[in-house]
Image (cartoon, rainbow, N blue to C red):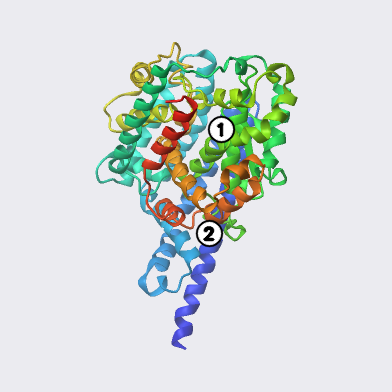
Amino acid sequence: MEQKKVKQPLEKTLEQFKALDEKITHYYSVIGLADWDQKVMAPKKGRRVFARAAGTLRTEVFKLSVSPEMGELLAVLSSPEYVEELDQITIAKVREYKSYYEKAKSIPADLYQEYSMLTGQANDAWEDAREANEFAKFQPYLEKIVDYKRKFAEIYGYEDHPYDALLDEFEPGLTVKILDPLFAKLRKTSVDLLNRIQKNGKRPNDHFLSQPFSVAKQKEFNRYILPIIGFDMMAGRLDETIHPFEQTINIGDVRLTTKYIEDNVCSAIFSTIHEAGHGMYEQHINPDFEESVLQSGASFGIHESQSRFLENMVGRSKEFWSYFYPTLQKFFPEQLENVSLDEFYRAVNTVEPSLIRVEADELTYNLHIMLRYEIEKALIAGEIEVKDLPGIWNQKMHDYLGVTPATDLEGVLQDVHWSYGDIGYFPSYSLGNLYAAQILRTIQKQLPDFPKLIESGRFDVIQGWLKENVHQYGKLYTPNDLIVKVTGEELNADYLVEYLEEKYAEIYEL
């Protein structure tokens, strides 16, 4: 009888916890659909009210996540007498909700609602500012967002730096103290390699990439390659937007977007491959995790590792284009008929400091991220103010990459992230590169014929490995635990440094 008295309340608690988990996940699914619609389909005149409605819905989810009911359930399921009886999946769910609950429970619901509505309006303001090429139109919205983020950091709490509290939202456990040395090593080696490449003078010919390429044919080519590289079009779609992104509605409804530029054929191809990396991660998560907090990637950095891996380490490889280039030539015979595979491969791997992050080459990309990382840290610490960002941005671009934006559109207004309040997100991109290189080394050991698999179009084997070792787990593991499980060690910058050195030493004959 004693056993039943212990088991019954636990079973009831688990039922209540599952119901609350499903309810929150369902809300997020609808919010995800609304977000996608606002960015892709919605007419501009309706966006102001739409932003308020979406803010109201997000506030309801917030209230559920920090409700007394959630607090009581987490307290019971975290208690010593029950935790030993929980399975691994439930323990992970409790971990995820408890982490958010402990940080957010002190945020007043009305403050959160104000913030949610602000970010909805800020995205429209950012688009207007881009159209006008005038940062001042976005400045007051960003000032408010930064003020909120500073308040949230204090509420969440931190040990060393207020930015740590925001980093943790995107990469649990990550701190400035951990990130600074990783980035310092990557920065030093990247700048050194860039200098050697520039002094070398053997720049690939990439001028043929800048001629007009029919947007309609670009769209057709992207839809051709997606299913081949493993994206399930029966469980997803591809659309067009200003800033490429992936949006998960649920595991069976994963939406990709890309941006087409007529005189830059590579932009849409590689952004589509990038977003497909995100999308396949979501499509491959264990179906048992659907309608739960675990039905997403382990972290934003791990998520970016999958998109950066597919975009660069697979998509920019010579083997990839050995398979796809003949088809691309058929789509664009006038532009590419007299361009060899080797010329094309070298062209898509040209290293050249540029103004726009999303069009940056694989080497200089990390320098774009470090610039944003330093700005965000200083903003949250109160060391710089929003009004000074255009000048600070331009100076850092000059210092890091030797180029200076002529306009706000080329500079501080180029990224959408701050309009959503995603301060702390940018480091995820370079973390993704670091994780990806480490995962690549493991794949190369376990699949010795990895290059031949790409060259022969056997992306199913590669995606099968990723699904088995990374994708299926969703949020079951923390990012650090997952990278250790996959590669046998914690995050190590050496693998990306070695990868970049080997790749570009060969391309540029260093």
Q: Which residue is mark 2?
A: 20
Label 1, on which residue? 316
| Mark toward the viewer: 1 or 2 | 1
Query: Which percent across, then down, holds residue 152?
Result: 35, 41
* Residue that lies at the very extreme toward the left in this rendered image: 160
Residue type marked 2: Leu
Quick one: 397 or 124, which is closer to the camera?
397
Sequence-first tag of 1 and 2 = 2
* Gap between marks 1 and 2 measured at Cα: 43 Å
Residue 129: where, in percent of width, then height? 50, 18
Residue 108 visible to the viewer: no
In the rendered view, does 80 fall on the left or right side of 267?
Answer: left
In the rendered image, residue 406, in percent from the top left (x then y), is placed at 44, 10
Q: Amino acid at mark 1?
A: Arg
Q: Residues within 10 Å of mark 1 (few under 14, many from 20)?
A: some
State how many labels appear.
2
Q: Nearer the viewer, residue 175 or 366?
A: 366
Q: Which residue sits at x=38%, y=22%?
A: 196
Near mark 2 (Cα within 10 A), the count class, few <14, some 14-19 or many ≥20, is: some
Q: Quadrant of the C terminus?
A: top left
Q: Is residue 3 visible?
A: yes
